[in-house]
Amino acid sequence: MADQAEGVIVPFHLPVLLTEVLGQLGVRPGGVYVDGTVGDGGHALAFLRASAPLGSVCGIDLDPRSLVRTEQRLAPFGVQFTPILGSYAEMVSLVQGMLGSEARADGVLLDLGISSRQVDGSGFGFSFQQDEPLDMRFNPEADIPTAADIVNTWSREGLVAVLREYGEEPRAGAIASAIVRQRPISSTVQLASVVAGAAGRQSGRSSRTHPATRTFQALRIAVNDELNTLTTGLQAAVDLLAPSGRLAVISYHSLEDRRVKTFLHQPRVSLVNRRIIRPSAGEIAENPRSRSARMRVAQRLAE
């Protein structure tokens, strides 16, 4: 399926680990489910179909443009789908504000990856594949510093810290020095060129990885405060779950996965699977961007 915007056909983002998510969450007719990062609505669409006719699905997203498209896509399900603009870190108040103060979820999904639409030339500035302004805010209307603000105003020491902590970048010092020398830097392609010149191929995770990949990851995490949001959001998800309800979290890099793994060893939940769930070879062939996905699932214990 695809979305048509301004005369251009844009494919919907392929939901990662879709069959596994449905099975692990045990989506059933009449259940209440929350997709905390609804994006293009691929997982939510499957939840709606599996929980019909009396189920309820809430889709939360920070990006108002994405939420409008998803609401249109899922309009045939009527009141069964509730779109909510906001952060999954606030899902308890957001969901209960829409469904009632006693509402609880039978399943919650957090897919922490950015969508193909956000990567492939959307104006977000997440990728150097297109020449775009250095923004990187999930919500383009949010009053928070952009990647351009960080790149052009932070000290060399501050940039080094961000690149090391959020990008695990071994050439953080050289890259930060190059950024300071070359600024102002206003576009994704310009930043990628500066980073590549400073880091060279050594900074890539493999020969297929652009040397600016870690820098872009680090800036995106810093702009959106992703790791702190994740910690708060995991707690919110457990708070919202009904007893025996399940939480599935799909992460894409070790910084996220370590936080998820640590959090899920708390006494309020039990692990459903001891081993990480990864995409099959078939899924990776169909959707190469799913390659780094890893899913952990936990169940809320009875109180």
Image (cartoon, rainbow, N blue to C red):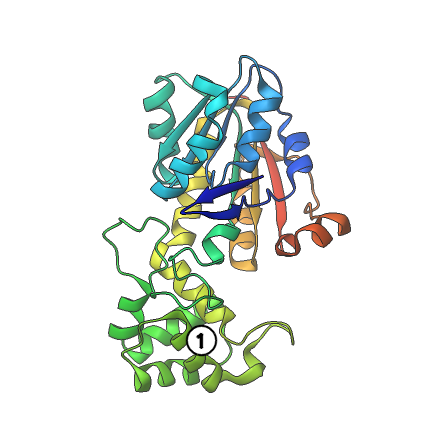
x%, y% of residue 92?
Answer: 38, 29
x%, y% of residue 171?
Answer: 48, 81
x%, y% of residue 301?
Answer: 56, 26
Taking depth in this image into account, of 284 and 227 the one nearest to the observer is 284
Tell me: residue 52, above or below residue 83.
above
Left-right relation of 51 to 166: right
Taking depth in this image into account, of 99 and 235 the one nearest to the observer is 99
Residue 245 seen anywhere in this rendered image of the structure: no
Taking depth in this image into account, of 39 and 178 the one nearest to the observer is 39
How dense is the environment of label 1, judged by Cα within 10 Å: few (below 14), some, or many (20 and up)?
many
Callout 1 secondary element = helix
Taking depth in this image into account, of 170 and 220 the one nearest to the observer is 220
Tell me: residue 122, above or below residue 266.
below
**Residue lying farthest to the front in this orientation:** 7
Q: Mark 1 points at which residue?
A: 192
Residue kind at label 1, given as amino acid type = Ala
Residue 276 seen anywhere in this rendered image of the structure: yes
Tell me: residue 44, above or below residue 205.
above
**Residue at point 56% right, 35% down?**
43
**Residue at point 41% right, 82% down?**
194
Number of marks drawn: 1
Q: In which quarter of the image is the N terminus?
A: top right
**Residue at point 66% right, 56% down?**
288
x%, y% of residue 232?
Answer: 40, 43
